[in-house]
Amino acid sequence: MNLFSLIGDFSVFFFRSLFISWKIKTTKWRILEQVYHIGIGSLPIIIVIAIFTGLVSIVQTSYQLIGTVPRYILGTTLGRMVMIELGPILTALMVSGRCASSMAAEIGTMRVTEQIDALEVMAIDPYRFLNLPRIIGIFIALPILTVISEFVALICGAVYAHYFLDVPFSVFNYGLTHYFYAKDFFGGLIKSLFFALVIAASGCYFGFKVKGGAKEVGKAATYAVVTASILILVLDFLVALVIFG
Amino acid sequence: MGKHMKETLVGIFIIAGIVVFIILYIWLSGRIGLRNTYDVVVYFEDVTGLRIGDPVTVFGIEKGKVKSLEIDRENVKTIIALDRDIILPKDTKIVVRSVSYVGSDRYVKITPGRDEEIPDVYYGVSEALDLESMATQFDSLFTSFKNFNMGELTEVAAELSRNIDKNITRLVDMMQKPTSKIDAVVEKTEDVVEELDSLIMLLKGDGAIGKLLTSDELYEEVRQTNLALKDLLEDIKENPKRYINIKVF
């Protein structure tokens, strides 16, 4: 399968998974389970990542800027870095690493053990039964995780700046709020929605297309994560171009 | 874990996400303030560069923020959220100033007065933001520099340098040439000075001329002699026959 047919197949798979009868009444529980698995399951690691994102960013920013610009710029820089780029990207990469692989492995195992065939035999649409809850689940969970990640990163940055860099909360807060543009905040969240779609699509697609045995399931998990990560970066550029370009 | 428990946790997760979203947005947009403030209405004629959230300082200390800006007829009605411990009398000076000349950051500077009356509204002034005129001046300066013919300037400078070199050479030559003549003059002058010196020594010394010039006794004798000669001549004039006897035969 060449690149173009892969892109075409991937797109058809994605739209077929999303644009079908949702049957919310029967799918609701499965969506909820996915939100639980992706959202609450990823929350601890996302918080850890966010803490260190905030700390590393503030240390690096202060190293480069303190002494050359007013200290409140630390707040401005950290705020915009976290909102526009670091929050959405790192959260999405972490969730893709954790969830895209598990989706691909789970669906791939169902494929090789013919469970998906069994679903079709029982007249259950596997796209709606397996893919739709995952896509909607991650679509709900990822922006929430992104917001929490940004919040934690900013708090950690502010605390570090106050106690270790002699930048009081009021000064940091002034920089953070004075140059705040709603576009930055919402732009980051819009990014995370696109990232959610590609993570779910990659995980489900490579799981669905598995042929063979356990080895192929492992490969599918790897492909899912790699593809999701690449697509996240490509979409990051495209969305940035549209919103901030 | 039961289905009900999962539902509850997912509900908490989503609500927490929405709450964090709202808190974060309100925090970042500068609408959360821990200060106990009250609103002060100030009218300005012009608030170029001033934005909502800009700091308000009282005696140089940040004590509030610009809360809102709106046009009210021919003025700009500015609402300032000011700390409750700051009271502004009637003669308070309120000025919109720039943080620096290079940035566009503006702030409101308040200098409270001493009056006892506290008005409902205040009137402030805005310091002119001269960046545009400064930029224009810089622009014209740069244009002048651009228009200046640097090639011509270089040529003029080279010509000037050549002339200076030439003149310095000539000056050195002029100073070197008359040295021999000056030496001869100096030598002759020295001879003359030596001769004069010996003459003076002669005049001052014990010789006849020296004594003639310096001896009072000689002077007196000469004077007496002179007087005697004078008398003699007068007597000769009066009685020539006494002295002159001419006999032809």
Image (cartoon, coloured by chain):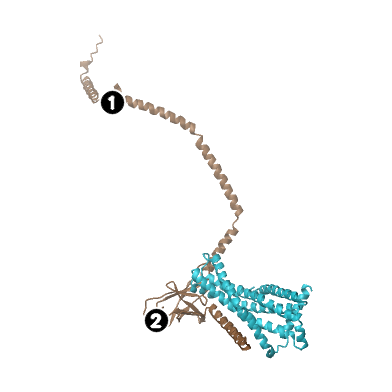
Chain colours: A cyan, B brown
Q: Residue at x 78, y 87 (%)?
A: A121
Of marks 1 and 2, the one in the foreground:
2
User: Which corner quadrant of the image does residue A8 belong to?
Assistant: bottom right
Which numbered disc flags the more N-terminal residue, 1 or 2?
A: 2
Q: Where is residue B211 in the image (x, y as percent from the top left)?
A: 27, 23
Please check whether the numbered discs 1 and 2 fall on a single chain: yes
Amino acid type of the residue tagged 1 in the rendering: Leu
Q: Where is residue A30 in the image (x, y as percent from the top left)?
A: 67, 86
Distance (Cα) linking label 1 and label 2: 108 Å
Amino acid type of the residue tagged 2 in the rendering: Ile
Question: Would you name the residue on which mark 2 appears?
Answer: B118
Name above or below for residue A102 compared with residue B166.
below
Label 1: how many Cα within 10 Å (few below 14, some 14–19, many 20+) = some
Work out which residue is located at the far right of the displayed protein and give it: A1
- The chain identifier of the residue carrying mark 1 reads B
Quadrant in which the N terminus of chain B appears: bottom right
Q: What's the mark number on residue B213? A: 1
* Residue A12 visible, this angle: no
Q: Nearer the viewer, residue A221 or B155?
A: A221
- Give the side of residue B143 with respect to residue B112, left or right: right
Q: Which of B44 and A173 is in front in this view?
A: A173
Give the secondary structure at mark 1: helix
Q: Where is residue B170 in the image (x, y as percent from the top left)?
A: 54, 39
